Image: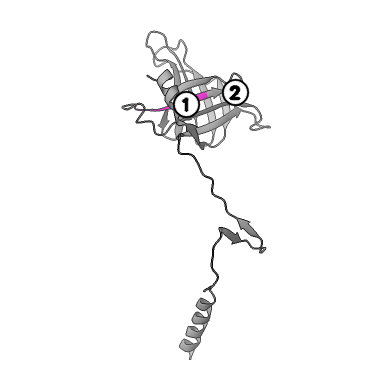
Amino acid sequence: MKKTLLILLLSFGLSSCVTTEDIKSVSKKVSNNVLTKETKEVVKDDGIEFIEWKCYKWNLSDKYEQHLLNIGYFPVLDELIPNVDSNLGMLELQDTLQVIPIYYTLMGVKHTFTWGNFKKDVDTTFQINIDSDGTGRFWDFTGAEKNEKVNSSQTYDCKSPETMIVDKDYVEQFVKTHFK
């Protein structure tokens, strides 16, 4: 008796899930019986992926108030520059809109961006590290001796990185101008 009742309940439950309605549109019903259209964004495949952080002046009371810089890297540029140990990237200063070529490496959980004059006779190297919590720090190694300890001189609040697509022609010209 129990088995028969269980089979009847399962049959009734499963048959109530079957529909004879044709689904022709890309719409769905939400809980309040309103139809909403789902849209798909068509993206041109002419770009190169770029991972970018937006960094702001560090401020306890007004976080993300003063936008200072955007910094990021291209995860895949092997076809443009083979045999490079670090990723290439860009730093854009918001006050001057100057774009600076940089190198990116992941050191543990720190995102490290380095740029400047790498000649050993005159070291004017700069670095920004972004921790996993979004705290960014800037170092200026100008005039520092080898292995000399240098303190960071600026701190930033950086938003979580976003992936964007940068025009392939722009990237190729940027790499050709700054990294070759």
| Tag of residue 94 | 2
Q: Is residue 44 above or below residue 178?
A: below
Q: Is residue 10 above or below residue 127?
A: below
Q: Secondary structure at mark 1?
A: helix
Q: Secondary structure at mark 2?
A: loop
**Residue for point 51% across, 44% down:** 42
**Residue for point 61% across, 20% down:** 95
Residue 44 visible within the image: yes
* Residue 13 % position (x, y): 53, 78
Q: Is residue 158 above or below residue 147?
A: below
* Residue 164 % position (x, y): 51, 36
Label 1, residues with CA under 10 Å away: few <14, some 14-19, many ≥20 = few
Q: Amino acid at mark 1?
A: Tyr
User: Viewer-proximal residue, 143 or 43?
Assistant: 43
The segment highlighted magenta reads 85-91
Mark 2–mark 1 CB contact (< 8 Å): no
Q: Residue furthest bottom?
A: 1
| Tag of residue 7 | none
Q: Amino acid at mark 2?
A: Gln
Between disc 2 and disc 1, whose residue precedes?
A: 2
* Residue 127 % position (x, y): 47, 22
* Residue 85: quadrant of the picture: top left
Residue 87 counted in the magenta span: yes
**Residue for point 50% across, 76% down:** 14
| Tag of residue 170 | 1
Q: Is residue 128 left or right of residue 180?
A: right
